[in-house]
Image (spheres, rainbow, N blue to C red):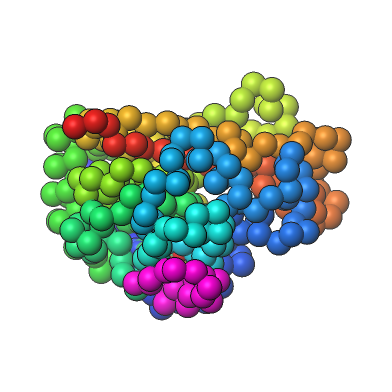
Amino acid sequence: MKYYINSTADYHQHDLNSLGWELTVCNSLEPVNSPCRKILTLPLSFGEHLYNFLKEIIPFNNLRSILEIGGGMGCLMRDLLTFNPQMQAKMIDISPYLLDKQKETLKSFNADFELTDILSADPASLSGFDLVIMNENLGDLPTLVAEQAKENDSEYDIVDYLVKLEHFKNKYDLSLGLNENEHINIGAIEILEKLCLAGIKYIYLSEHSCEAVVPEHMKQYISFRSSGSPEMILLKGHKEFTIKFSYLQKIAEMLNYPARRGPFTDFLHLNFNDKVKTALRLTSPYNDEQEIIRQFVYDLYKYEYLILIKGDE
Ligand SMILES: C[S@@+](CC[C@H](N)C(=O)[O-])C[C@H]1O[C@@H](n2cnc3c(N)ncnc32)[C@H](O)[C@@H]1O
């Protein structure tokens, strides 16, 4: 089986100068008058919704330090620090453009910033944090792309990645590489292991999932395949891959991190009114708002989160 490496590092380091075209769920909920806020039961920002959910699971009052990796515009961290100003925050990002945006958004908070590819960060530098957040960015990390016909013409050395693949396959008893057409979220697996081995007490991750399932009651309104194998998503200037969360969950549990996993709809509750139903039923939307609603509702079901809490020693 031949693989090549899909990396978004160059794109994020040199070409990215806007997040507008890659509208994350977090950014969709940012404008106070966003149509996405209006179709939730409460018209709050992403960070406010997520905090209300996480605070039932994570004792925020006891947390002293928080790290967000790949924080985009910095809005999620702004909300978390607004609720918990006692936390010392750190933002690590590979993109100089976005790190500058984060500095601007968080200028009135207690936060440090570091321009680094998280996969090259020293594990010891991660170990002091109580909570680590990675929202909607695991799919940006390197993926081993299975493609029989294609030569490995990428500049990335595949050998190191194949060594890692063997390591993860054997150590965690994963069927990595057995399906010869399956792409492998090697970067997501690597960062998950790195965070668990660093002994972080609380970890929150989220991304598009290749294992998400449309619930029965929504099948007449939205549809996507639950393929179970990472799928390619073409975006401006780069491509990323959906995440096979079951592998991440298995590794975490083997490293003594019991997991809670679910769709974004667990904390972003849809107000399923006639306006939403109409937008979803149309084969082609009549206006921009309907288009935005359709994409947003699709994302609510296509994204999964994983909350990991370090078990007792
Ligand atoms: C799709 S954006 C998500 C932004 C934000 N978390 C949100 O939910 O809106 C991906 C983020 O991850 C960052 N990123 C991508 N690859 C990274 C890497 N290898 N190391 C650190 N940050 C990375 C990007 O620069 C960007 O901030």
**x and y, in percent, of residue 90 in the image:** 38, 64
Q: Quadrant of residue 141?
A: bottom left
In x, y percent, where is residue 133?
A: 41, 52
Quadrant the C terminus occupies: top left
Quarter location, residue 4? bottom left
| x and y, in percent, of residue 233 in the image | 50, 52
Answer left or right for 272 relative to 60. Answer: right
The outermost residue toward the top is 216
On screen, residue 119 above or below 290: below
Residue 26 found in image quarter: bottom right
> Is residue 268 within the magenta segment?
no
The residues colored magenta run 95-114
Residue located at (42% from left, 58% from top): 87
Name which residue lies at 25% across and 69% down: 155
Is residue 174 visible in the rendered image? The answer is: no
| Residue at 23 percent of width and 45 percent of height | 199
Left or right: residue 304 versus residue 177 is right
Q: Is residue 112 magenta?
A: yes
Is 138 situated left or right of 43 in this image? Answer: left
The residue closer to the viewer here, 153 or 194, is 194
Image quarter in which the N terminus is found:
top left
Q: Identify which residue, 247 or 115, lies in the foreground.
A: 115
